Image: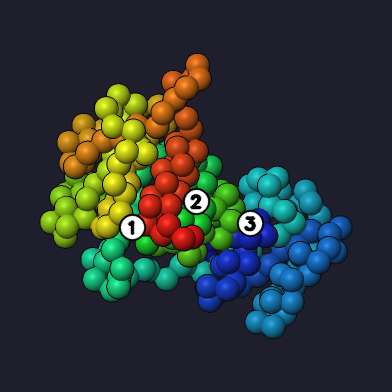
């Protein structure tokens, strides 16, 4: 069982076909957005219970539930990364997150990846955040729509991607080439480092080239989710000029 909270996250889970055993709704909320959840739940024969906001806070473990908490069965296992890549009829567009640990950052990265048309997000199992209720809430549905793979050996996975002809573009503040000078078309994976530490040595060495974001102000770096958004949408601009 997994508890999911937040309007977008719960609706996305319902749309995905995951088995929902129970929904708790805030008894003082009767707005249209919550009624959309009620209608979908009633159509699926899902039990609904009205509770106080304080009870929802306890059920979600967070006050950011937006008036709804759902209890869902386990998510269906996605096809393997290899199967997904084999099934694509366009050049792969991937996001690799090397050790992002903050669930808010991961959720924001997934949301941006969905918006930019990324085919999959890859992260290591060690020293990295996985999909949690907070990630699902921040991702606003993208945790259901974007395949997310946690791999045991990231360096080996990167080598496998390169063997498939996928170019790896890493981000580093000291890189000589600007993001806007890089060719981000064709089969490629954008590789982002962890908060504060950046990419690990083996990850950096696996990259085909490194790029940096031009920084004109006094700050030295951007939040990883912000930097990811900038990079992904520059890639999208290059890959689909008419978008």
Question: Is 211 located above or below residue 60 in the figure?
Answer: above
Q: CA distance from mark 2 to mark 3?
A: 20 Å
Residue receiving disc 2: 112
Q: CA distance from mark 1 to mark 2?
A: 13 Å
Front in this rendered view, residue 118 or 31: 118
Could one spot residue 198 in this view of the protein? no
Q: Quadrant of residue 221?
A: top left
Residue receiving disc 1: 93
Instruction: Please tell me how crowded label 3 is: few (under 14), some (14-19), or many (20+) other residues with Cα within 10 Å.
Output: many
Residue shown at 68%/47% (left/top)? 64
Question: Is 20 located above or below residue 138 in the figure?
Answer: below
Residue shown at 29%/61% (left/top)? 92
How many numbered marks have been drawn onto this rendered protein structure? 3
Which is nearer the N-term, disc 1 or disc 3? 3
Residue receiving disc 3: 5
Name the spot of residue 22 as percent of width and height, x first: 65, 70
Question: Is 104 located above or below residue 84 in the figure?
Answer: above
Name the spot of residue 217 as percent of width and height, x first: 50, 20
Instruction: Please tell me how crowded label 1 is: few (under 14), some (14-19), or many (20+) other residues with Cα within 10 Å.
Output: many
Front in this rendered view, residue 184 or 196: 184
Instruction: Please tell me how crowded label 2 is: few (under 14), some (14-19), or many (20+) other residues with Cα within 10 Å.
Output: many
Furthest residue in direction top, as rendered: 218
Furthest residue in direction left, as rendered: 163
Which is nearer the N-term, disc 2 or disc 3? 3
Front in this rendered view, residue 182 or 40: 182
Name the spot of residue 188 as percent of width and height, x first: 27, 53
Q: Secondary structure at mark 3?
A: strand
Question: Is 219 located above or below residue 243 in the figure?
Answer: above
Could one spot residue 35 in this view of the protein? yes
Which is nearer the N-term, disc 1 or disc 2? 1
């Amino acid at each position: 069982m997994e508890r999911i909270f937040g309007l977008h996250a719960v609706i996305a889970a319902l749309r995905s076909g995951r088995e929902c055993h129970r929904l708790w709704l805030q008894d003082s909320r009767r707005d249209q957005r919550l009624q959309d959840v009620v209608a979908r739940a009633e159509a699926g024969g899902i039990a609904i219970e009205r509770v106080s906001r304080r009870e929802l806070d306890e059920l979600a473990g967070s006050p950011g539930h937006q008036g709804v908490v759902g209890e869902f069965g386990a998510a269906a296992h996605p096809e393997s990364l290899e199967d997904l890549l084999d099934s694509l009829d366009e050049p792969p567009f991937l996001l690799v997150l090397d050790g992002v640990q903050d669930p808010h950052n991961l959720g924001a990265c997934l949301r941006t990846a969905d918006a930019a048309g990324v085919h999959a997000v890859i992260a290591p199992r060690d020293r990295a955040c996985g999909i949690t209720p907070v990630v699902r809430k921040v991702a606003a549905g993208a945790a259901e729509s974007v395949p997310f793979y946690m791999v045991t050996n990231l360096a080996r996975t990167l080598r496998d991607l390169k063997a498939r002809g996928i170019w790896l573009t890493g981000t580093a503040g000291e890189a000589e080439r600007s993001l806007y000078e890089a060719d981000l078309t064709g089969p490629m994976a954008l590789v982002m480092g962890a908060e504060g530490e950046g990419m690990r040595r083996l990850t950096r060495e696996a990259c085909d080239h490194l790029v940096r974001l031009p920084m004109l102000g006094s700050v030295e770096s951007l939040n990883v989710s912000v930097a990811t958004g900038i990079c992904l949408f520059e890639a999208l601009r290059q890959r689909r000029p008419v978008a």
